[in-house]
Amino acid sequence: MPETAGIEYTKVAEIKGPLMIIDGITKASFDELVEIETADGERRLGKVLEVGFGKAVVQVFEGTTGLTITGTKAKFLGKTMEMPVSQELLGRVFDGLGRPNDGLPDPIADKFLDVNGEPMNPERREYPTSFIQTGVSVIDGMLTLVRGQKLPIFSGSGMPHNILAAQIARQASVVGTKEDFAVVFGAIGVQYSEAQYFKRSLEESGALRRSVLFLNLADDPAIERIITPRVALTVAEYLAFDLGMHVLAILTDMTNYAEALREISAAREEVPGRKGYPGYLYTDLANNYERAGRIKGKNGSVTQVPILSMPADDITHPIPDLTGYITEGQIVLGRDLFRMGVYPPVNVLMSLSRLMKDGVGEGKTRSDHMEVGNQMYDAYSRAQEVRALAEIVGKAGLTGVDLKYLEVGDMFEQHFLKQAPDENRTLDETLGRAWEVLSTLPEGELTKIRDKHVKQYYKGK
Amino acid sequence: MSSNSALERTISKVLSQKEAELISKIDSAYQESLNNLEASRGKLEAERTRIVESARKQGENLKRQIVGSGRLAARNQELLIIESAVNNAFEEARKKLAASGGKDSYRELSSSIIEESVLSVGSDEVVIECNKNDSGLIRKILSDLQEKNPKVQAKVSDRSIDVLGGIKIKSADGTMTYDNTLDSRIERLKPLIRKNIAQMLRGEA
């Protein structure tokens, strides 16, 4: 701890939005943690955003409501924000700033880690190639998640992304190995009922003991949301690279994170970028998303599934747009499927897992996995075209093969895509269902699958 | 008589025809039932396997849930016990510190705390606050310090503070404060000390 650690200043020059400007500063550092004490003794946390000319701009995480220029004290702690980490974090629930929220004491730390993390050396990164089973057919079969990947879910308001996230958190596993698996769940600006749902869902499935939850609720100060993904990812990195666990980090909802970033940017009077978001939104998102991966010589991995709700279902909105540049594919939830009552309503034609090809196949999952996935894409895409055609010419105008594709489309949605939120399908079950869908088609239509696999699995006449 | 026997023969013929018909129907129904039974057996077997499999999965889930919750509850209980022991250890340490007022080691500690604090505040004109018992000791240390470094313009405040020991130092204009009391130092180092105490309690140290 530096010699200035713990100096308390009382000269607050200005309070503006989530920011507080303190005068008479002799020594302070960028990103330094600040403990603020209100006139009536309440304590809040903040961090230094700018220093210079004897002033420091402090961003107050819990918001500045109730703070006054006189009577407010700011203690500069001489360190950046840190998260105490140890294996004991598993099974614990924290708030959005990493403080215990489960009635238990502060964790006894093995070490304290800077929540901003350390950038991974690109040369030491290992290419992700191992399969994670989520038990959700459409993800395992067609959008396979690979250890160390970052695969976001693009959703819309009111859609069941949180139910899907909780299902993935409960069911995710590394099949066929004895390696430890953990889930770090960062809820950013979620409703109380949703937070309770996540917690209860993990408790009831027995998955809580291998999970760490960070819950920032919708009525918590927006500025706190800047920290929630950072503390969650710090813990994920510790579990992965210090303890050798395979960690799935689920962050929902990153749109709330970006909104908080916009709020701070506006208060700092920065030049706004698209839709008022700061120009550095891309860099800031990348700072979080790039904390996924594997490191050569280390056992563990951090796999990220950030969830973001697209305002007005607009995929060109800056948040999904920039996220798409950074991550390795996306899972898009479709409003039409949702209205049809299909769960999970994944629009596979807009979704993609860029690393799937490296994580499936002989020796990893099943030799026909990739081919079946491709054929399913092809068949469903054709089914959509035939549906559109049928709207114009009617069913009577369709050929026999076209009618088969119509059947495939329905079967794909009802038999393969649709599953219960508590239904955990094995990969064999998923591929079995995929073959049942594909077997509706004449054998000659299966052009993306090798003959030996068709002979082995095709069930049609 | 002959007409009666003809009638009887006809009736008997009809009856035997109907009997044969009925027997054939019963036979075919029986055969059909056997076939149905055979076909259903396969379905039934599949259904039975599905129900058994689903019950087995449910059982496994339930077991995992019960074992998981049990382990977690036990771990949480352990955390609470350790925390209570750690708090007791801190309480004991505080009592010992409070009783160490007159010792030479405390004088040395107070002297280094004052030097460190003056340096940290970065101002030569400072006001020092301490507890009632330490007031004399702090004044003595300060006069020694001022002899060594006459630039330091420190005065001890008449207002005492309720702390175990150490000092709180303020710049003359009151805008800058450095809390270097023993209470505050313990709080600063508590997260690190807690780990050591917990290790001792678990027999790991």
Image: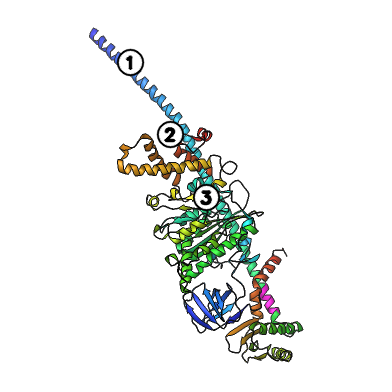
Q: Quadrant of the C terminus of chain A?
A: top left
Q: Amino acid at mark 1?
A: Ser
Residue at far right of view: B104
Residue type at tag 2: Pro
Answer whether residue A315 is magenta in the image. Answer: no
**Start-end of magenta stretch:** B89-96
Across and down, in percent, residue B28 comes to 38, 23
Mark 2 element type: loop
The foreground one among B35 and B136 is B136
Identify the image quadrant of the N terminus of chain A.
Answer: bottom right
Q: Residue at x 60, y 81 (%)?
A: A26
User: Considering only vertical position in the picture, is A218 above or below B132?
Assistant: above
Mark 3 Cα shell of 10 Å, populated few (<14), some (14-19), many (≥20) = some
Dot 3 or dot 2: first in sequence order is 3
Q: Amino acid at mark 3?
A: Arg
Q: Residue furthest top?
A: B2
Q: Name the element at disc 1.
A: helix
Circle nearer the viewer, 2 or 1: 2
Q: Quickly name the residue at label 3.
A: A354
Query: In the structure shown, which secondary structural element does the residue marked by tag 3 occupy?
Result: loop
Provide the residue designation for mark 2. Answer: A442
Residue B87, can we see it? no
For the question of whether residue A150 can be seen, the reply is yes
Which is nearer the eye, A59 or B46? A59
| Pointer 3 chain | A
Calculate the distance from the C-alpha at mark 3 to the C-alpha at mark 1: 79 Å
How crowded is the residue under tag 2: few (<14 C-alpha within 10 Å), some, or many (20+)? Answer: some
Q: In the rendered structure, are the residues bearing label 3 and label 2 in contact, judged by CB atoms less than 8 Å apart?
A: no
Task: Identify residue for label 1.
Answer: B16
